[in-house]
């Protein structure tokens, strides 16, 4: 019985074109990679070239493991591979490109998994074990079973070791868990047998090569321009913000979209377990990541270590990947109370649950510390419709005996819009005291930012670099930018003018 084709599209890795077919299948739909094929003689020839390359190209361990020089190393390999191939045979340009890419994947990458990493439609890539096909999570079709399979468990361990070494970590029988990132910035997690009783497994969470921007989130209705104008204002005036939400609700995405609103001359220190944030180059940003201990239990650098150290680095803004432990939370909230502007994420489904998570074990913060948080943004993932939305914008209100939640804006599930819910009881008062603006000035300031955001959406400003140009221009000459925007001048003209 012929399979029903749902979609077919082409992709490119380096200079090699390949195709993906999504087909309907019982149980789980299939993701079929149509990769370039080599004849048996060409496959044997490629093995000979590989052996000669290993002998001929001298690359130090530092170069192989250093993500910063990986591109140069690949170029060096590719050039040498082309020479070797052309010395022995006269292939067509297409065959030459295929051979070089396959060599690069095999010697410096993760084999055929590199083709999956090249698909921007994929969010997750999972090697379950050598006994099962690789599975992927597609943005449009959800979980799919691929036609790729790793033939041996040893190869999965080898891939895990490649990932680990590039971030200065180890994965062994004694340390069978790994949380790291690839050279592409994608996050990788590995679990070895027998901790995973099926075999060795690797999970790769892919991040957008060009990260989401505020324009993207307004267009896909995650939140409207008015809410993002409010967030922009809060960030400029150094208000403390917590982003809450469930797993895969979009917490880190929202945080990543918010941070470019920071002034270019403010020092940002970010602290994460693995690098997920991607900020524009012009920001004054120092990204820090934790490190696991070696097999002897030495060399560990915890999030608490980095958080305490960051306070000695004269930061204007501190960004914490996720609040998980009591001591981390204590230091973070102490930083808020000593005048640092802080942003962090937390697993909680509502503003009220955020409060409960913070004041109960394991975090167990004293309730009076929560007054340092100015805004709590809560993200939500609607699994049925496959959408992510800003569910609530709230604040923490301290009473005599407790801390309660006040929801300023909330998402209307039926109308799929975010709308006012309650009047703010302290946020605008805090902002007014902090900036000297009265409520009319605050509202007018929000409207001006909304005007700029609406113009960016109308102009279809794409990519982090372009969105960042406008935000940078705002801080350079706000009044000139507003004049151009009010005249609905094109994006290109605005960039040239500023």
Image: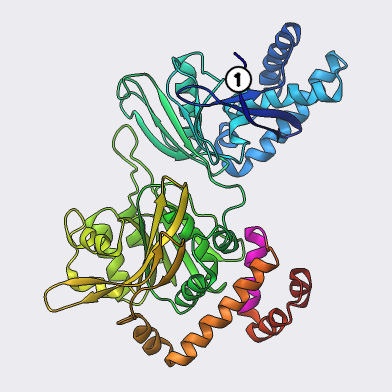
Q: Which residues are magenta?
A: 462-474
Residue 464 within the segment the image draws in magenta:
yes
Does residue 85 sit above or below 168 in this rendering?
Answer: above
Judged from the image, the secondary structure of the residue bearing numbered disc 1 is loop
Q: Where is 341 relative to 380, above or below?
A: below
- Name which residue lies at 72% across and 6% down: 40
Q: Is residue 59 left or right of residue 374?
A: right
Coordinates of residue 161 in the picture (x, y in percent): 46, 28
- Could you say which quadrant of the image residue 265 lies in? bottom right
- Relative height, residue 243 to residue 125 (above, below): below
| Residue under label 1 | 3
Q: Is residue 365 visible?
A: yes
- Main SS, magenta region, reads helix
Q: Where residue 231 sits in the image (x, y, percent)? A: 47, 72
State the residue at coordinates (41%, 59%): 413
Q: Relative to 196, is 394 above or below?
A: below
Quarter the N terminus occupies:
top right
Where does residue 19 sit, x and y in percent of width and height? Answer: 69, 28
- Can residue 310 be spotted in the picture? no
Residue at the (49%, 69%) spot, across then down: 267
- Apparent side of residue 256 relative to residue 335 in the rendered image (left or right): right
Colour scheme in the image?
Answer: rainbow
Q: Residue 418 lies in what quarter of the image?
A: bottom left
């Amino acid at each position: 019985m012929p399979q029903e084709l749902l979609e077919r599209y082409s992709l490119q890795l380096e200079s090699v074109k390949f195709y993906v077919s999504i087909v309907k299948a019982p149980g789980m739909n299939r993701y079929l990679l149509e990769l370039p094929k080599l004849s048996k003689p060409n496959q044997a020839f490629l093995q000979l070239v590989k052996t000669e390359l290993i002998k001929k190209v001298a690359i130090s361990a530092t170069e192989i493991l250093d993500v910063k020089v990986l591109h140069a190393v690949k170029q060096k390999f590719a050039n040498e591979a082309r020479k070797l191939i052309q010395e022995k045979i006269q292939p067509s340009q297409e065959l030459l490109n295929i051979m070089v890419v396959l060599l690069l994947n095999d010697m410096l990458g993760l084999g055929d998994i590199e083709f999956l990493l090249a698909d921007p439609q994929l969010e997750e890539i999972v090697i379950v074990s050598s006994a099962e096909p690789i599975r992927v999570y597609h943005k449009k079709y959800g979980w799919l079973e691929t036609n790729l399979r790793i033939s041996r468990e040893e190869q999965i361990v080898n891939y895990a070791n490649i990932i680990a070494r590039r971030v200065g970590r180890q994965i062994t029988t004694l340390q069978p868990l790994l949380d790291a990132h690839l050279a592409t910035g994608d996050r990788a997690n590995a679990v070895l047998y027998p901790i995973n009783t099926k075999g060795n497994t690797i999970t790769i969470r892919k991040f957008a090569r060009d990260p989401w921007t505020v324009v993207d989130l307004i267009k896909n209705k995650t939140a409207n321009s008015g809410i993002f104008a409010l967030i922009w204002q809060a960030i400029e005036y150094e208000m403390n913000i917590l982003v809450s939400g469930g797993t895969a609700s979009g917490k880190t995405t929202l945080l990543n979209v918010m941070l470019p609103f920071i002034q270019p001359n403010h020092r940002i220190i970010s602290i994460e377990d693995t690098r997920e944030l991607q900020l524009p180059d012009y920001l004054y940003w120092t990204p820090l990541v934790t490190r696991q201990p070696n097999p002897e239990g030495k060399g560990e650098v915890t999030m608490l270590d980095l958080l305490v150290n960051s306070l000695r680095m004269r930061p204007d803004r501190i960004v914490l990947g996720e609040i998980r432990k009591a001591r981390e939370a204590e230091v973070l909230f102490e930083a808020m109370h000593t005048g640092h502007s802080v942003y962090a994420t937390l697993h909680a489904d509502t503003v009220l649950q955020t409060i409960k998570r913070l004041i109960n074990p394991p975090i167990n913060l004293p309730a009076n510390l929560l007054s340092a948080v100015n805004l709590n943004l809560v993200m939500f993932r609607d699994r049925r419709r496959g959408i992510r939305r800003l569910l609530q914008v709230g604040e923490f209100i301290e009473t005599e005996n407790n801390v309660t939640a006040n929801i300023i804006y909330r998402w209307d599930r039926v109308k799929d819009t975010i709308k006012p819910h309650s009047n703010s009881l302290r946020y605008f008062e805090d902002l007014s005291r902090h900036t000297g603006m009265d409520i009319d000035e605050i509202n007018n300031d929000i409207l001006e930012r909304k005007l700029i955001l609406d113009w960016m959406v109308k102009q279809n400003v794409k990519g982090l670099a372009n969105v960042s140009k406008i935000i940078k221009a705002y801080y350079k000459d706000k009044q000139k930018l507003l004049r151009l925007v009010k005249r609905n001048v094109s994006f290109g003209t605005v960039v040239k003018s500023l």
